[in-house]
Structures are given as structure tokens and as C-alpha cells.
Amino acid sequence: MYIFIENSVIHNFELVPLVFELSLRLRPLPLRCSHSDCASRNIIKHGKGRRKNIPDVQRYLCKTCGRTFCDRAGTPYYWKHYPAQIILTCLDLFYNLNTPIRKQARLVPQVPRSPSHRTVMRWQRDFALFSTRLKDTKLDSSPTWRGDECYLRLGGRRVYQHAVLDSESRAVLSSLLVRRKSQYEAEAVIQWAHERTERFPKVFISDSNAAFGAALENLGLEKTVTHEVVNHSDGFRNPRGYDTNLIERFWGTFTEWYENPSFRGFKTWENTHRYCETFDIYYNFIRPHSSLTLDGKPATPADTAGFKHAGCWSTLIGWMRNNLS
Ligand SMILES: [Zn+2]
């Protein structure tokens, strides 16, 4: 098999060392013992482990508990027989390019061999499970938030994705996939955004759905938070200049991903929930936002909200392994 990369044609066997080399660079350095009951930072290198289909793994010895572990332990690559580069490419294909699972399996370099679509599905599932621990990570927020819900279909039924976005950083502060859209769900997303940012906004913008107004009242915020309602009949901008463009754009990106045909095949209530949370993680931590820059470079919402390890899957995975349990 020949592959075309940046104007040069290379053969599959030349690709193998290339993918291995890249995978070595993507490997996060463990800073603590991977055994969750220990998590000691007193670790030393302990030889290399040979693997048939992936680059050799570095082994470590924990001097506190005496157990050993490899540098893939505690990451979504653990027990996977493929280089990190291949697994991360599939993540990008799914969240960034909305690529069907079977097509993902065909598109990644066949190193050591082509993964089956079931294998790719398992990578996606394991990554979604791993990344849920990131959803409570603290983010800074501005005084203006926007809340809304979006109608989706799941298993032939109507469901709603609720979300609260920060106006300045564009970060999704909280989201919730539920079967109803009442004030209780609106209250829950506002409360979760509050737990994550440790503040309430001064201005909360929503459409004419009464749920957010009632939720702010239930939370005792009607005097401290100004609720700005934007009626769609006003052309999406109210007389005081507030609009819902930001959240409508987010729904555009979200539904384009959610409606991708391959995703329909494995949507159950439980895993859709997790994939939607992982989409928020992709949106907050990986995807550079066209209107955000930091030091002249395109930035992610998380960069703008004060999180220092965003912008790339492998950095994020390394940080999660060493800092979250
Ligand atoms: Zn240990």
C-alpha cells in the first residue's frame, strides 16, 4: 500500500517507523504511581517492555508501594495494541471531522494492521469514559452567561441537550442531556456551571423559554442576576443589544457532529450521554475557536478560561493521568 503525504509517495513499510516515532513523542510522562490506592510521586525508571505491535514501553517502579507499571497505564492507550498516534487520529476524525466509525478504521495508517470498526468503537468508548473526569475541572468565567436547550432525537424519542456557555471564553460551562426541558433541568445546568466556576453571572441571556427565568428565581438569583430574554421575533437581538448568536453557533457545530450518520448506529442512552460530554471536552479543550487568540495564536475556550494544558489530545491526556483520578 502506498500513501501520499505532503507531495511525496511513501510505502507502507516506511510509514511504520514514522508512526512509531510520532507515537513515542505523544507518550505522556508519568509523574506518579498509576495504582490509584498509592499515587506516590516517588517513581523511577525500571527497564523497557517489548511489545509486538507498538513501540517499546518504558516501565516504572514505585518506590513507595514496590509495584511496577508502564507508561501507558492510567491513559486510554492502556491494553491497546496500537500506537498512540493511530488512536488519537481516530479521536480527531470522530470529533473534528465527524467521520463514520467504519471510515475511521479505513483511514488510519494500517500500522501494524488495519483496526476493525469494533476496535475503533472500543477506543472511542474508552476515551469517552476516561475523559468524563475532566468535566468538573475549574474554569474562569466572565459576568455574562448564555443558556439554551437544543432538541435532538435519540432512539426514536425526543431528548434535549441543555448548555450554559460563557460569553467571553466561549467555554461550555455545563451541559445536560435529558428527556425534559423544565425549570429543574435549567436549574441543574446553572448550578453545575456555578460549581465549576465558583461564581454566578451578573447577566444571564436566554431565549423566551420561561424555564431559565424560573430557575434563576428558584436559585434565589432574581435580584443579583439580570435575566436578558432574547425573542427570536426580535431578530435574535433584544433592545438592550444582547443576542443569542454565540449559543446558536455552538448548537450548529454540536448538531452537525451529533447528526453524523455513523453515530446513529451505536447511540444508546448511556453512551450518547458520555459522547456528548466528550464533545464538550473537545469543544472546550481541543478545538481552537476562530474568534479567540492567545499570544497571537489561535486559542481554545479553555486557554481563555485560564486552563494551561489545552490544545492537544496528548498533552491533555498526560495532564489528566497525572492530576485527576
Ligand atoms: Zn505506588
Image (cartoon, grey):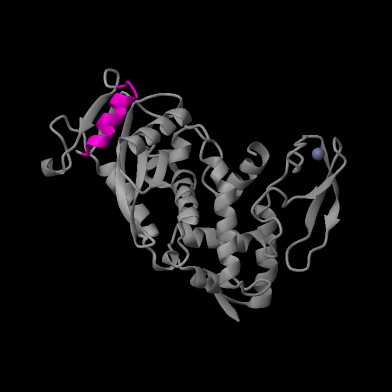
- Residue shown at the point (76%, 37%) measured from the top left: 37
- Viewer-side residue, 97 vs 153: 153
Residue 142 seen in this snapshot:
yes
Q: Main secondary structure of the magenta part?
A: helix
Q: Which residues are magenta?
A: 209-221
Q: Position of residue 157 (x, y in %)?
A: 34, 58
> Within the image, what quadrant is residue 34 found in?
top right
Question: In the image, 111: left or right of 132?
Answer: right
Q: Is residue 93 above or below residue 133?
A: below
- Residue shown at the point (43%, 33%) measured from the top left: 192
Question: In the image, 251: left or right of 51?
Answer: left
Residue 166 seen in this snapshot:
no
Q: Quadrant of ligand 1?
A: top right
Q: Is residue 184 magenta?
A: no
Q: Residue furthest bottom?
A: 1
- Viewer-side residue, 273 vs 276: 273
> Within the image, what quadrant is residue 200 found in?
top left
- The image quadrant where one finds the N terminus is bottom right
Q: Is residue 102 above or below residue 278?
A: below
Q: Is residue 62 above or below residue 121?
A: above
Q: Position of residue 253 (x, y in %)?
A: 35, 53
- Viewer-side residue, 159 vs 168: 159
- Residue shown at the point (66%, 66%) measured from the top left: 18
Q: Position of residue 65 (x, y in %)?
A: 85, 38
Total labels drawn:
0
Q: Position of residue 222 (x, y in %)?
A: 27, 21
- The image quadrant where one finds the C terminus is top right
- Residue shown at the point (78%, 68%) measured from the top left: 52
